[in-house]
Amino acid sequence: MSNRNLRATIKPLGDSALIVQLGEGISPSIHELVSNLSTLLNDHPFEGFIESVPAYNNLTVYYNPIVVHRLQINRQTHYTPLTPFQKVSDFMGELVKQIGTNKFHNERVVTIPVLYGGKFGPDLEYVAKYHDLSIDEVIQIHSENDYLVYMIGFAPGFPFMGGLNEQIATPRKETPRLVIAPGSVGIAGKQTGVYSLETPGGWQIIGRTPLDLFLPTISPPTLLQAGDKIRFAPISPKEYDHYKGMKL
Amino acid sequence: MTVKVLHPGLLTTIQDLGRYGSQKYGVIVSGAMDSYSLRVANLLVGNDEGEGALEITLFGTTLYFEKDSLIAITGGDLLTTINGENAPMWRPILIRKGSILKFKSAIKGCRAYLAFAGGISTPKVMESKSTYLRAGIGGFQGRALQKEDTFECGKLNDLNHSLVQQLENLNGHFTWAVNYSALINLKSSQTIRVLKGTEFNRFDSKSQQTLFNEPYTITTQADRMGYRLEGNTLALSEPFELLSESVTYGTIQVPPNGQPIILMADRQTTGGYPKIGQIISADLPSLAQLQPTSTIQFKEVTHEEAIMELLKKEKIIDEIKMAIHYKRIY
């Protein structure tokens, strides 16, 4: 893969962060660029770099503007001193050119056991009716595809996944629930995801996993990370109880 | 030393400068809403500026000191008393064993910071002592302080010790105090400086002007997560769907109802609403001191101005740091 023609749009997010946009929309190939850029940056950070956060088609870079301001730049081509944003922007622009010469992509496949329907999946019947399918068909369609984790956001460990079959894509609930239990597996449009903490939320809940997605005492603190491939495996109530008792 | 909570007040949490490095896992930054006041409080007692301290919101917090302690109170003026007498702010105070420290009510600003020499002995979670209420991690057992809680302070370093020794010979506190007026603004109506947001150009021209010409009021739905504002409605020139992406402290986002929300210390890591503006870092601590019903006038500035302001304030912090070292020597 060659990215000599790859163009990034770099826009400031205030005076202490910027967003490197690598394309539009949701696609695995753009996500791979985001993921590679993130790895490159972590391997070759600039002084003052704090952290980076991948999203669907861009990477946000957080930096300490005071530290960056004090950095001496060799190629000072401007008459006025460069702002920290300009310095980091130049650095990221150079880094973008190096994407693709190395393949960093780490392909991890994680299986998530799910107990579908019943009290753990109160919207499964609605999703089935909405698409004129049987409950078993919805379960089969949801668990036969691989999904890509594009980003973790909203709550610690909450994966935004793409790859949902159009046949079961369902709009969000009109009125969000006030409380959704951790482990709840949901659908929102063409996305699927898993609630990691007890929060309010509007996704259609079709099942629940006994696994903990947020693991604050270990590093990294989440079961899933951006770039992971996910497969959902239907389980019985007995298997759910078995997994639930297990500690990682 | 041991501190006991007699009354937790409205909301009292342990905060430091925030939990960085885990936003890619969806873990929010948290940290002190007014980072300048937190840093100065720590410096005044001889701590590292990023040590954990108490963030006390508006009123009610009452603490009992079981041992002699070196403390400093900064930030908003919450009419603080020690055994019923007014407590000085912005300077080190030696508080005696058996004393009661009370934050009565906010007469200026919104949040006070209380630092203890030696810091607060609470374990770091993901490199930070900040409380993340929703996930129940960090700070004091992952939650706000409650009645009957007790916590310990850490071991004193040389600077902590020398400040204590000097105060033993004085009346319990110095006669000098830090002048905070160039660092934070505690007025109830403020001009807050803003950079254009990533979607600024997606808003219609009337809304672009409105943002910088009309005042906005902070509603009562304002907390550590965000300030909901009320004022003239802001509208996109044409509707569009934004995919979720990173947001940060001070991001002004506009949901479909057109009333802006400023994201604060406990913001989510990502958001999907268009971002019309971004508060400059140097003004965030002052913004954090505004109470509900306060008014804001936004003013547009350039990146050059934003960094100049930040450097100016960093210089003040450096001067305070040097002055405290100087006071220790003489």
Image (spheres, rainbow, N blue to C red):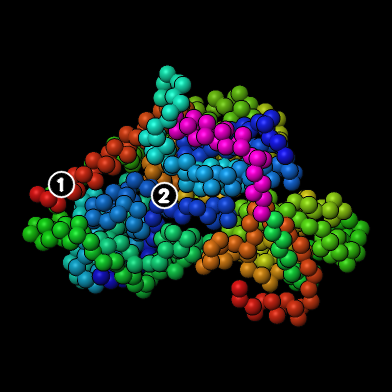
Q: Position of residue A182 (x, y in %)?
A: 64, 66
Extreme-left residue of the structure = B169
**At 73% from the left edge and 66% from the top edge, which residue is drawn?**
A111
Along the line of sight, the residue nearer the viewer: A192 or B102: A192
Q: Residue at x 64, y 49 (%)?
A: A104
Q: Is residue B254 left or right of residue B21?
A: right
Badge 2 element: loop
Q: What residue does disc 2 label?
A: B33
Q: Earlier in the sequence, mark 2 or mark 1?
A: 2
Q: Amino acid at mark 2?
A: Met
Label 1 element class = helix
Indicate whether residue A99 is drawn in magenta: yes
The answer to whether one can see residue B194 in this image is: no
Q: Is residue B93 left or right of residue A182?
A: left
Residue at image position (15%, 46%) is B326
Q: Residue at x 34, y 35 (%)?
A: B311
Q: Is residue A128 above or below residue A53?
A: below
Residues in magenta, as a range: A83-106
Q: Amino acid at mark 1?
A: Tyr
Q: Quadrant of the N terminus of chain B?
A: bottom left
B238 sits left or right of B93 in the view:
right
The verdict on residue B218 being magenta is no
Real-space Cα distance between discs 2 and 1? 29 Å
Residue that extends furthest to the front in the rendered view of this protein: A101
Name the residue beneath numbered marker 1.
B326
